[in-house]
Amino acid sequence: MTISRPLLQVAVTLLLSATLTAVVAPAQTAQQPMQNRPGTEPWKSISIPPLGVFKPVEPTRVTLPNGVQLFLVEDHELPFITGFVRIRGGSRDEPAEKIGLVGLYGQTWRTSGTVTTSGDVLDDQLAAKAATVETGGAQASTYVSWNSFATDFDSVFATAMDLLLHPNFQQSKLDLAKRSELTNILRRNDDASAIASREAIQIAYGPTNPYGRISEIATVSAVTLDDLKDWHQRTVAGTNLIVGVIGDFKISEMEDKLRAAFSPIPQGTQLPAPKIDFNEPKPGIYFANKGDVDQSNVYMVGLGTEERNPDFYALSVMNEVFSGGFGSRVVQNVRTKLGLAYDVGGSFGAAYDHPGLFAVGLGTKSSSTDAATKATLDEVRRLRTDPPTEAELRKAKDDLLNGFIFNYDSPEKVLGEQVTLAVYGYPPDFLERYRAGIEKVTSADVARVAQKYVQPEKLAIVVVGNDSEITPPLNQLGPVTPLDIAIPGAPPQASGMQ
């Protein structure tokens, strides 16, 4: 999809035009037409071409008999090859008593190395080739990835496959990963905004929901080396693997190499998506006192939606009107006009296979906590009462469409998104539908989804700040539920409570 001329190009064009005018016809500057005189707005007369068709490069897709899916893209611009194996199963699948397992697994997997080569030796071997092989974990998947010069692909890919098929999890490396994670837990109350975000997510989803729960000292400490081995054995099966490779190669040759490497892997059983119940949070004011700060961080949260929802496009436009940059409603009114917030923003979030979050956040002085929260809530309510004007609608849609292309302005980004869509069962042309979906949105559509989804009275409001400095007190907004952010199992000085 082509986009309107980038701002930098426009600026250069205007600068060159001004320079040529000054050099070629300096005597005419006193008689400039009105539209070119200082104080006018000549940029408004710039002709902006319509957006072109967005047609991302389609990867070559191959499914092996054992269920392994291959996504291949030729890109000969640079002599590199990048690849990854994405494996279904992530932190949302962890047992409740061992939250943090997948993060520890992702770290320990790479640092431990393989049966034949330690992680430290791998570091040296890969550095000599300016190559990388990495592992990690996320909410719904784990991965091993690699990057190298095309001439080194065979050896680097062999290392990645050795790591995939013959890992050698080491206790010393697990202990190191644990120490790092435990340090993060002990310091998680250092930053007030991080506390507010964490508590808001927990309240929105629920502390036992896989998307809301967090690792604790006890759950991290409970993870054993056998847990890592069992996880690897359970997830690394043909039907769980999606492979993406992009770079300087020929499709037919790369397909042959990947078939030879992945075909021997047993098919196994695909890890099913977990069945998770989602319930709206209990409305009210939730407060965590942090006496060493002089400002408040506020989050208003509720459940959002999924990207497969037909209302996704109208909600996206609503988001842009509400909080799409400096010209948006909430920024203009709460931050610019009223001066009540250092920063403010939010959106009705959408995730691939579960409800995202409807979250609105702001940072403000302690003394303006009440006023800033009320003003922001007013803007949320105004989504239901004031449909976007034609100017707001046009700007929101233009900004969304012009910005969308930068999410997929390289073959690597497109490949990564196509694999993600495959993981969650979305149609291959989902990206191409985006433009048409946004363009069809009307002001009436935005008003309809605002009425349907935006329920200010159902939002939970999380505030982290200095109780002694918040005036008027928070109970002016409603009943306040104190939040205990003390870290279980940590020394009192590490709790962050003041």
Image (cartoon, rainbow, N blue to C red):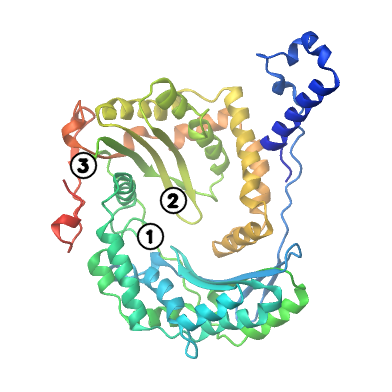
* Rendering coords of residue 425 (x, y %): 57, 62
Query: Counting residues from the N terminus, which is met first, the one under dot 1 or under dot 2?
Result: 1
* Snapshot quadrant of residue 125: bottom right
* Snapshot quadrant of residue 209: bottom left
Q: Residues within 10 Å of mark 2 (few under 14, many from 20)?
A: many
223 up-or-down from 26: above or below:
below
Name the one closer to the observer, 240 or 3.
3
- Residue at horizontal 34 percent and vertical 50 percent from the top: 201
- What is the CA distance from the residue labelled 3 to the residue labelled 1? 38 Å
- Residue at horizontal 77 percent and vertical 76 percent from the top: 252
435 up-or-down from 74: above or below:
above
Mark in the foreground, 2 or 3: 3
Q: Secondary structure at mark 2?
A: strand
- What is the CA distance from the residue labelled 2 to the residue labelled 3? 35 Å
Q: Residues within 10 Å of mark 1 (few under 14, many from 20)?
A: few
**Circle 3 sits on which residue?**
292
**Circle 1 sits on which residue?**
276
- What is the CA distance from the residue labelled 1 to the residue labelled 2? 11 Å
**Circle 2 sits on which residue?**
355
